[in-house]
Amino acid sequence: MKSTHKPTMKDLAREVGLSVSVVSRVLNGKAADYRISEQTQRLVREAATKHGFSVNQIARGLRLQKTKTIGLLIPDISNNFFSSIARTVENAARRRGYAIVLCDTEDDEQVEQEALSLLLDRSVDGLLVSPIGKASAHIQGACARNVPLVLVDRFFDDHDIPYVTTNNFQGAYDGTSHLINCGHRRIGFIQGLPDSKPNCERLRGYRQALRDHRIPVEDSWVQGARFEEADGYASAQRLLDSLAAPTALFASSSLGALGVMRACLERGLRIPDDVSLIGFDEYPYAPLLAPPLTTIAQPTREIAELASRMLIDWLETGEAPTDRVHVLDTELVLRNSVAQLTPPA
């Protein structure tokens, strides 16, 4: 007859020839804290899997009043920037013994509110949120419940919620200035979600660069409503159809830049011979495009690592971050999608 005995942690320790404390630390996600080797971790996990052994995290969480889970809300998992954020956060959390519950809000405020409520009902220990950025009452409501919360990328000026972001203003200013220095004067800007903080700052940087170079700011040169490929495509079509078509386009997202490239391809326009292009966000395939795309790179990994560390330190010490605001630098990555006009347009 098959044994119905459920293995205990002591049984596992005996089988793999290790102490109960070592087995416990591996199964409870504490291996890194105690510098337990990868080989030992693999040995323990293989034995646990073999016997169908699992730590009762629910009971453990009830005892400690912690679930060792972190809720992560992002606006669009299909956007490489946010998928990279999610991957880095998951890795950072796992190293410190936490699991991630991921919610894609699809840049929809109603979905965001429902997802936030769901995570709070699941008693997550803390929250990492990249908010849509238009409404903040529900985010503030989570803070009022004393749930540690750190904002990622997008944030709100009128709240004291800790956040990590990049200098979106400077990034857009640098990109626009580069186009101007290459002789361009008619520069179209394809924005993302209006009223979201990154979009507002990128648009402000674009406009300020034009003003500083004494170039009139034309409202008709600003198009777009979402950080999406389809929106970039439609916005580029409108700009290229204008009477004074731009000689250069600045897409405020990587997906928007792809939309611009598709619109140009369909029209038989060559980048950069006919239209120059810069995209905001560096991504793995940017150097592989034809032509390789000049971009404003964000330190995506550093953003996610820092936000994760801020939140988990808060969870483990019970003290909110003393350095509440972190604004990281962008980098202008020069490739072949911008032409030098001679003479300047």
Image (spheres, rainbow, N blue to C red):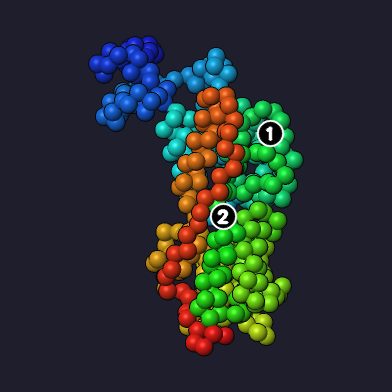
Q: Position of residue 153 (x, y in %)?
A: 58, 49
Q: Secondary structure at mark 1?
A: helix
Q: Residue at x 50, y 84 (%)?
A: 341
Q: Is residue 34 above or below residue 155?
A: above
Q: Which one is in front, 324 or 34?
A: 324
Q: Position of residue 50 (x, y in %)?
A: 33, 24
Q: Is residue 180 above or below residue 167?
A: below
Q: Which three-letter amino acid code belongs to the residue tagged 1? A: Ala
Q: Is residue 225 above or below residue 163?
A: below
Q: Residue lying farthest left?
A: 17
Q: Which three-letter amino acid code belongs to the residue tagged 2? A: Asn
Q: Residue at x 57, y 85 (%)?
A: 345
Q: Which is nearer the N-term, disc 2 or disc 1?
A: 1
Task: Please state if 220 lies on the left or on the right of 198 as rendered.
Answer: right
Q: Please say if the residues under marks 2 and 1 sit with CB atoms less than 8 Å apart.
A: no
Callout 1 crowding tier (Cα within 10 Å): few <14, some 14–19, many ≥20: some
Residue at the spot of label 1: 142
- Spatial distance from mark 2 to mark 1, Cα to Cα? 26 Å
Quadrant in the picture for the N terminus: top left
Task: Please state if 133 lies on the left or on the right of 298 as rendered.
Answer: right
Residue at the spot of label 2: 167
Q: Residue at x 52, y 50 (%)?
A: 328
Q: Position of residue 169 (x, y in %)?
A: 60, 59
- Residue 178 appears in the rendering: yes
Callout 2 crowding tier (Cα within 10 Å): few <14, some 14–19, many ≥20: many
